[in-house]
Amino acid sequence: MKQLRILAICRPDQLPPDSLEGLSEKEVYACKTEWNVHVTLREAGHEVHWLGVQYNLAPLREKIETWKPDIVFNLLDQFHGETLYCQHVAAFLELMKVPYTGCNPRGMVLAQGKDLSKKLLKYHRIPTPAFVVYPMSRKVARPARLKFPLIVKSLTEDASHGISQASVVYSDEKLEERVKFIHERIGTAAIVEQYIDGRDIYVGVLGDDRLTVLPIWELKFGQMAPDALPIATETVKHNVEYQKKRGVEDGPADDLPKPLVSKIRTMVKRICRTLELDGYARVDLRLDNDGTPYFIEANPNPEIAPGEELAQSAMHDGITYAELLERILTLGLRRAGQQPDYAEPTSQRAREVIPEMPASTPAPPLTK
């Protein structure tokens, strides 16, 4: 790929520092994606400028008009403190007629409303847990069709925000308690789903009209505390010390039968096309003890740090981190009607789905 002028946008508190030297482990973790994207793109020869975006789009418009980037690398996960407002930033980039990475705003709307995505996919006969939504201040009355145990989550927040062991409830009293917690502490509507006892499965996807499904990944819970359920709580997902203590890790779900792997891959493609997801995405499934995969949620523009599920599964498929970022750029340019130059890809599957992708130097590990 030719050298590009790339404007990378993220929250102001996640802007990559000049160096990781002297930063705490917590500070390094907070900007891990931005740091690795920055270093990798610079090493590939691209000119990268960063802009923190949070409450005002005027600086973004001014930067686009004056610097004229070839593409915007969109790493924004909130705007005005709201996850759902990210779709408006993507729509703004479309109005500015500038290429950008990641998902289009229509796909973000359909995927980030957990109730809407489930309704659409249930219509298309994708297995989904039974659910009900409790808007803010709405009285909690459990429908007879919802049987315990149930899991209570925020309707719109992602990254396991607000999820703990207490999220799984076994009585109407605890259900009301947890819905109240979501309303008052998280500040969003609550979605209550049938709890699926089974395995946490993640499937990364790259592409537009032609989709590359990456190897199926699994969150492995290690040595759980007594009576703890295997669910992706905030602690499990983000507390590095807890992960080390309990042996929590993610990796390839290698023991799945080939027919089930084929079923999951086909299901994930149907999910992405139904929800109009493009760029890169991660589909979260719950595989029950009978081998039925249930759709839990779709994540447009998920974390792409080298240690996260999407990048790890891509690497397992022979796609280096540098190649992954180049492919994300390529998809953004292609959506805008631009056809970048390609080189030969590493993996056979990548060659079959998106031919002639570039090879470049991988990013250094995220260490101090």
Image (cartoon, helix red, strand yellow):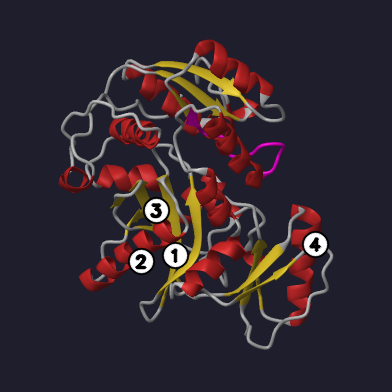
Q: Secondary structure at mark 2?
A: helix
Give the mark, 1 or 2, whose residue is nearer the N terminus.
2
Spatial distance from mark 1 to mark 3, Cα to Cα?
14 Å
x 32%, y 48%: residue: 313
Label 3 SS: strand
Residue 179 rendering spot, x and y as whole percentages: 75, 67
Task: Tell me which numbered mark, 4 or 2, is placed earlier along the sequence.
Answer: 4
Residue 77 is inside the magenta segment: yes
* Magenta-drawn segment: 73-82
Q: Position of residue 356 (x, y in %)?
A: 18, 34
Label drawn at residue 136: 4
Pointer 3 residue: 250
Q: Residue at x 21, y 29 (%)?
A: 342
How much space separates mark 4 and mark 2, taking CA atoms?
33 Å
Disc 3 from disc 4: Cα separation = 34 Å
**Residue type, label 4:** Met
Q: Is residue 191 left or right of residue 117?
A: right
Which residue does the numbered mark 1 point to in the structure image?
285
In this picture, is 294 found above or below 24?
below
Q: Position of residue 114 (x, y in %)?
A: 59, 61
Count residues near mark 2 (Cα–Cα under 10 Å), then give few for <14, some for 14-19, many for 20+. Answer: some
Disc 1 to disc 2, C-alpha distance: 10 Å
Q: Residue at x 46, y 31 (%)?
A: 100
The amino acid sitting under disc 1 is: Leu
In primary-sequence order, the first of circles 4 and 1 is 4
Q: Which residue occupies the foreground of this view, 305 or 49?
A: 49
User: In the rendered image, which residue does mark 2 sit on?
Assistant: 267
